[in-house]
Amino acid sequence: MSQPKIYIQAAEQVSIQQPLSQQWMSEPILTDQLLATATVPNYRDFIDPREARRMGGLIKRALVTTLKVLRDTGVEHPDAFITGTSIGSLDYTERFLDALDESEEALSPTYFMQSPHNTVGSALAIHTRSHGYNTTYSHGACSFDWAVMDAWIQMQLGKIRTALVGGYEEMTQDYFELLQKTGYVGQPGMAPCAEMSMSMMLNTQCSDNCLCQLAGVAMGNLAYRERMRQQLAQMLNAAHLTAADVSAVMTGKNGNPDNDACYDGIVDDLLPGVPLLRYKHLFGENYTASAMGVYAAAHCLAQGMVPDCLQEQPRLFKPCAILLVNQMDQQEYSLMLLTKI
């Protein structure tokens, strides 16, 4: 039995760029802020204001991108909702703890109810009245990558045909200051620390509006470089491609010298000389920022062009296949291969 092909049918974002739009490809918004909040879309177009008033910002942004994807694809009830978020509804978690510290009276349940990580996935299923597989990955900087891997495996096994996969992250001032002290974000020359929401529909059926094909997913430990090379070779072989067919490599470079040098080493080891793309200077750095890399690569393949704002050394070419590389703390890595339909 042949393995099914998997397609990214639609993908939408809310970030520091213009929300629910690909305007960033021609008119990118650049910021020198160390901490940048997401640009708020018009929630009224998607959520009843009476419901929205009791929702945290993370859930509202996740709902907007999800509902836009469902509208675009016509898939009312995906077989699965698979969510990646490292810190979840951090704002409401902090508000609940602050209230607990300041008062011995009865506390409002809203902050507590919406503080768990899986609240996002639950809210999406409740709002769309979906009763299928629903899980959340909170695995640090590889949360979104594991969500994609989960969907990939289940589709390959024939258990599901459609999956709404998303990466959602928010940031508070207090938590940003803690991360800044560790050097993870907020350093000179680094991409801004930013909030984001990205939802995409994976489907085993190709439609006219599909963006691209998700041709392969692999994860592992950076200590085993030979294993990484084998995984890439297997993905390319399964997609009937060679290394020469890879148009570009999308990396998670963020301006941190140690982080960026690690990516240079990986690319030199896997695909030396291939054009390099980056996205965090446009969408910001956070634990699930890799979702924005997938989003950007998918739309580049769909439109048959890569804007200069994504390229390290701008050149004119039509992308046929883009390899996405994400590494986490120089220990773990993920590889995703996207190809033009």
Image: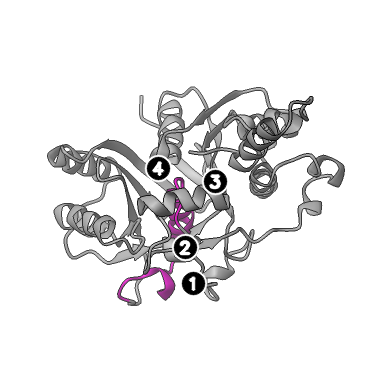
Q: Horizontal and vertical percent for residue 338?
A: 38, 50
Q: Horizontal and vertical percent for residue 245?
A: 25, 58
Whether tag 3 and tag 2 are in contact, CB under 8 A, the answer is no
Closer to us: mark 3 or mark 2?
Answer: 2
Identify the residue at image location x=87%, y=42%.
50
Residue 305 magenta-highlighted: yes
| Other residues around mark 3 within 10 Å, as few (<14) / some (14–19) / many (≥20) | many
In the picture of the structure, the residue carrying the numbered disc 2 is 192
Identify the residue at image location x=23%, y=44%.
232
Of mark 1 and mark 2, the one earlier in the sequence is 1
- Separation of marks 4 and 2 at Cα, in angstroms: 16 Å
Q: Horizontal and vertical percent for residue 314?
A: 34, 77
In the picture of the structure, the residue carrying the numbered disc 1 is 32
- Separation of marks 3 and 2 at Cα, in angstroms: 14 Å
Q: Secondary structure at mark 3?
A: strand
In the picture of the structure, the residue carrying the numbered disc 4 is 141
Whether tag 1 and tag 2 are in contact, CB under 8 A, the answer is yes
Whether tag 4 and tag 2 are in contact, CB under 8 A, the answer is no
Q: Left of 264 or right of it: where is 338?
A: right
- Separation of marks 1 and 2 at Cα, in angstroms: 7 Å
Q: Which segment is the magenta one? A: 285-313
- What amino acid does circle 2 point to? Pro
Vertically, is 16 above or below 175?
A: below
Q: Left of 282 or right of it: where is 112?
A: right
Q: Left of 179 or right of it: where is 10?
A: right
Q: Is residue 209 visible?
A: no
Of mark 3 and mark 2, the one earlier in the sequence is 3
| Other residues around mark 1 within 10 Å, as few (<14) / some (14–19) / many (≥20) | few
